[in-house]
Image: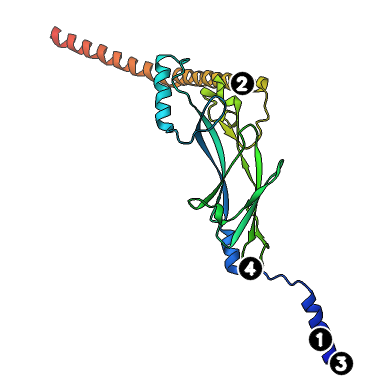
Amino acid sequence: MKKILFLLILMIYLTIDVKATCNNQLRSQAANVSVNYVLGEVAITEDGVEHPEVDLEELRKTIAEGAKIDPNLRVSDYLIADIVNLKIYNLTDKLYVTVEEQDEGMIGTFTYDDVVDGEITIRVPDTEKIREYKVRVFSNDESCKDEEITSPPAIKTPMYNPYSAYEICADQNANKYYCQDYVVTDVNIDEDELFKNWNNGNGQNENNLSDQTKRTFKFLLLYVLPVTLIILVIFVGIKIKRKKNKNKVNNL
């Protein structure tokens, strides 16, 4: 009976697809995988074709020199455009990752063969909206093939903020969130509210300046002026007393 039971258990075990658990070494490698985004620049033509072979520093100098002559003068066949790249670091040959964008769905699967200079680079299509990416790390090792080991926190890539080009963002508002060139949180403010905040800020500064002036005047009136008058009276009294003593001496 025991032999029959043993054989039965063995048969059931052999028919079940037992999936091995990834070892600690693989889990440590997976935990080391990180995700980030990097802002960059690239030379483009008017039709949007990129030219990575163009030296950006030389192009920047050419554009700047032309602007000194005439801001509207076109001195180059290229423009400089901002780009955003999603970066995945520390992937090993024992792992692979999938990348999914919240709105567009699966972007693709990337392995160690896609690593260049220690990182995987994925171009973000544009900077017109905030995009959220989710990266999942899987085992590429036969011991636990295709098991999802970990998933770094989702990351948002920035969008260009058109308010940053407004003149009001060139003064004391430059550090405000709604004045940053690129943002990863929606700027929930319209133009009317933007100018209202700016005007209120200026008015508040003027009020603060007015209050400070009042406090300064009050201090001068209550403390500095009386002390000055007392010192002046003492000084005049001493001068008069000395003059009288001098006259007495002369009369003798």
Q: CA distance from mark 4 to mark 2?
A: 64 Å
Q: Badge 4, how many Cα within 10 Å: few under 14, some, many 20+?
A: few
Residue at 50% across, 21% down: 212
In the rendered image, residue 52, in percent from the top left (x then y), is placed at 48, 36
Q: Is residue 148 visible?
A: yes
Residue at the image point whose x is 67% and y is 27% from the top: 189
- Let me know if residue 226 appears in the view: no
* Residue at image location 57% in from the left, 53% down from the top: 34
Residue 1, disc: 3
The color scheme shown is rainbow
* Earlier residue among tags 1 and 3: 3
Q: Residues within 10 Å of mark 1 (few under 14, many from 20)?
A: few
Q: Secondary structure at mark 2?
A: helix
User: Which label's residue is closer to the chain start, 2 or 3?
Assistant: 3
Return the residue nearer the eye: 155 or 243.
Answer: 155
Q: How many marks?
A: 4
Front of the two marks 2 and 3 = 3
Q: CA distance from mark 2 to mark 3?
A: 90 Å
Element class at badge 3: loop
Mark 3: amino acid = Met
- Residue 8's quadrant in the figure? bottom right
In the foreground, 98 or 129: 98
Q: Are marks 4 and 1 in contact (CB under 8 Å)?
A: no
Q: Mark 1 touching mark 3, by CB under 8 A?
A: no
Which residue is disc 4 drawn over? 142
Q: Farthest right residue? A: 1
Numbered label attached to residue 200: 2
Q: Which residue is mark 1?
A: 7
Q: Earlier in the sequence, mark 4 or mark 2?
A: 4
